[in-house]
Amino acid sequence: MILRKATLGDVDSLCALYEIAADDLSSQGIVQWQWGKYPNRALVEADVLAGRMYCLYGEPGMLIAVSVDTTPTPAYRDVNWLFGVRPGVFHRLAVHPSLQDRGYGKRAVEDVITILVSLGCDSLRCDAAEDNRQAENFYRSLGMRMAGKTWFEDRQKVFVGYEKRLIENCPLLPQNMHPAFRAGKLTPWGGERLRSVFHEPIPEIPTGESLEVSCIPGLESTNDLGVKLPDLISAYGTKFVGRYEFQPFPLLLKLIDAKEPLSVQVHPDDAYARDHEGGKLGKTEAWLILEAPEGAELVYGIQPGTTLEELEKACQRGADVEKLLRRVKVKAGDVCYIPAGCVHAIGAGIMLYEIQQSSDITYRFYDWNRVDAHGKSRELHLKQALAVTRLDCAPKPIPVPDIPVARVLDETYFTLDVLNPTEKEIVHLPHIRDFGLLTSLSDDLTLVWEGMERPLKKGHSVFIPNSAPALALRGTGRAVLSMPR
């Protein structure tokens, strides 16, 4: 090691180094430090007295100074960190201009890492001003990941957090997900409630679908820094998605606003999709009804006794198919399981949460004779729809039990848990298999884990990696957790 712990006898030399370093940054147009304001003598003395300050002394005086700690600053709570439950941090790394570009900064950080590992830390965090390209390049050269932005009230400037794993089995933390949208002519039945209810930045009205967690090409969800979910999977592999590192990502999570009824449709199973849709996955899905007007209905199967020939002839005549559709009433809190082959349609006025296989294959039977502004109707797929329809499929809605953790579905492709924490009872999430997709349906929930917490807003979805720590929900409200089966 080149660093040693600083003593009170080093304070004058440390202050002189920080003044030189602040002036050097200013000469490069980087307004990150202003000696006397930040950093200042009181801060240096506090670091020394707390045993946090490490340094290197030589010619022409104090050459390196850095503060090392195991307590992250409160501002770091705003950053969407990915690594570690026992982070160590360093602040105020100063290298004398005479030593810069000679590898001393790198050696100093290596010493910091040695110190933090000896203290039981599993990850390293630091920050730099958003416009400090020199620091950005330096941290990237050390293999550090940009994690997100934060704000220090006393410094009136945006800062960027950087992080690095220090040990092989470092946990990966939950990641905020930002959705892609289907809107406009793709979802003429949509509305604006994804914005008014869930505060989503919808691109236009109508918008029907918010793809909360998605690997669908061209519609990928992203983390806070805009990194697409497939790229996160590629970067972090098994620790991120378990057995799906080298398999197609299996699930797609949506929030859906149906101002008008959706088309009557059906989806293929895996075998049909593989043989007829270029090897894609089939589509089994499930819905949790979030909002429904009085008397709301779904199309949920075909009327008993209907033959495939009768269904085909009715579809060819258009509106005649309506009398063959099985309808069920639903209310908020109902869960509907829709296996591949089950004919279905979301009714007008319903908002819902949808978990499904990661597939975009839909075969339309009927679209209520709906036309666009040019009088053109949407494409139907009668041949394919008839080929995959299961006439005997007649499931019933499942009311969600009012208990802290309700496993409502445990099916071939996914599980679905509804979580109901209260002020009196924190709810521990079930064990995560491969990965988890958590969506808050309330504004007063906080996701907590060892040494950290993250407030969740209504409609906020979080990706939970395979190697995440044990998680719990605090607050009052409802959340939904889906996982691969």
Image: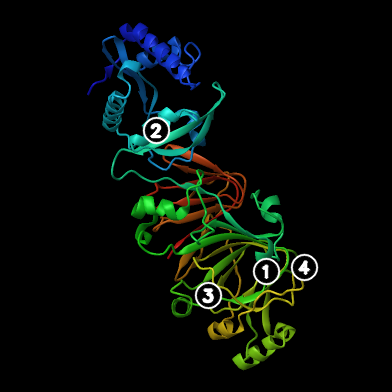
Of the two numbered discs 3 and 2 in the rendering, the one whose residue sits closer to the viewer: 2
Mark 3 / mark 2, whichever is N-terminal: 2
Mark 3 / mark 1, whichever is N-terminal: 1
Of the two numbered discs 3 and 1 in the rendering, the one whose residue sits closer to the viewer: 3
Classify residue 280 as left or right of residue 119.
Answer: right
Q: Tag 4: residue type?
A: Ala
Q: Which residue is mark 3?
A: 339
Indicate the secondary structure of the residue bearing disc 4. loop
Mark 3 / mark 4, whichever is N-terminal: 3
Q: Which mark is residue 373?
A: 4
How far apart marks 3 and 1 lie (CA) works out to 18 Å
Of the two numbered discs 3 and 4 in the rendering, the one whose residue sits closer to the viewer: 4
Q: Residue 278: name its quadrant.
A: bottom left
How far apart marks 3 and 2 lie (CA) works out to 50 Å
Q: Which residue is mark 1?
A: 330
Place of residue 324 in the rendered image (x, y in percent of width and height, measured from the top left): 68, 85
Indicate the secondary structure of the residue bearing disc 2. helix
How far apart marks 2 and 1 lie (CA) works out to 55 Å
Q: Tag 2: residue type?
A: Asn
Comparing 335 with 185, the one in front is 185
Comparing 261 with 326, the one in front is 261
Place of residue 159 in the rendered image (x, y in percent of width and height, measured from the top left): 50, 30
Place of residue 19 in the rendered image (x, y in percent of width and height, measured from the top left): 42, 11
Classify residue 289 as left or right of residue 368.
Answer: left
Q: Quarter of the image for the C terminus: give it.
A: bottom left
**Does 291 sit above or below residue 88?**
below
How far apart marks 2 and 4 lie (CA) works out to 52 Å
Q: Tag 1: residue type?
A: Val
**Does 48 sit above or below residue 158?**
above
Q: Which residue is mark 2?
A: 137
